[in-house]
Image: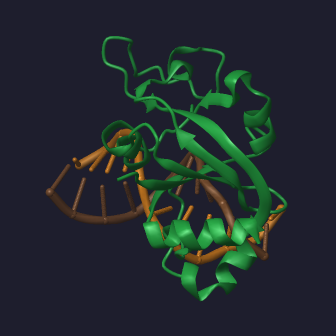
Chain colours: A green, B orange, C brown
Amino acid sequence: MPQYWLMKSEPDEVSIDDLARAQGKRLPWFGVRNYQARNYMRDQMRIGDGVLFYHSSCAEPGVAGIASVCSAAYADATQFDRKSKYFDPKSTPEAPRWMNVDVKLVKKTRLLPLTEMRDRPDLSSMWVLRKGNRLSITPVTADEWRAVTRLLEA
DNA sequence: GCCAACGTTGGC
DNA sequence: GCCAACGTTGGC
């Protein structure tokens, strides 16, 4: 049974179009610096899991496409790059603190705006809609996945 | 730019 | 281990 996830990205940094342009239409989901989100990638994600690619911190936040997990978790290279804003001086290659999976584009969709998601009773259970939610990776139930993908095709 | 929410840090 | 201060997220 595949699992489903919603993953937030700031489109100024990595957008759905960036993923579409990437070689093999796949990219590492680098830059996660929150333990709960890291643990989801490290411990629970499996190749083939479904991903709702969500644009955050932008003019029109919402789901911008569908992707899938296409690697196991491995050390996030940016934590060792002194020039990266994700550099972590406390992490070492021997004991890397931060991990990422790779994700692959399934398809770019219409933008499903956050405001529309909030209007849908069938999406009201989604973690990303909870008040005060800041977690950048959240699990999505099979029911929520079906409801969202149906809306994306509408 | 504002600010609510919440995770992390560090002194004790 | 507590918890105040601080920093970050992210919608608006």
Q: Position of residue A117 (x, y in %)?
A: 67, 76
Q: Against A96, is A125 above or below?
A: below
Q: Residue at x 41, y 54 (%)?
A: A3
Asked whether A54 or A143 is in front, the reply is: A143
Q: Against A70, is A2 above or below?
A: below
Residue A83 lies left or right of residue C2; in this view the side is right
> In this view of the protein, can residue A128 be seen by the observer?
no
Asked whether A8 or A51 is in front, the reply is: A51
Q: Residue at x 43, y 47 (%)?
A: A37
Q: Residue at x 38, y 40 (%)?
A: A46
> In this view of the protein, can residue A115 be seen by the observer?
yes
Q: Position of residue A141 (x, y in %)?
A: 43, 67
**Quadrant location of residue A123?**
bottom right
Residue A41 lies left or right of residue A55; in this view the side is left
Q: Position of residue A126 (x, y in %)?
A: 51, 72
Asked whether A83 or A98 is in front, the reply is: A98
Total tally of numbered discs in the picture: 0
**Quadrant location of residue A129?**
bottom right
In which quadrant will I find the C terminus of chain A? bottom right
Asked whether A15 or A67 is in front, the reply is: A67
Q: Against A102, is A61 above or below?
A: below
Q: Against A71, is A43 above or below?
A: below
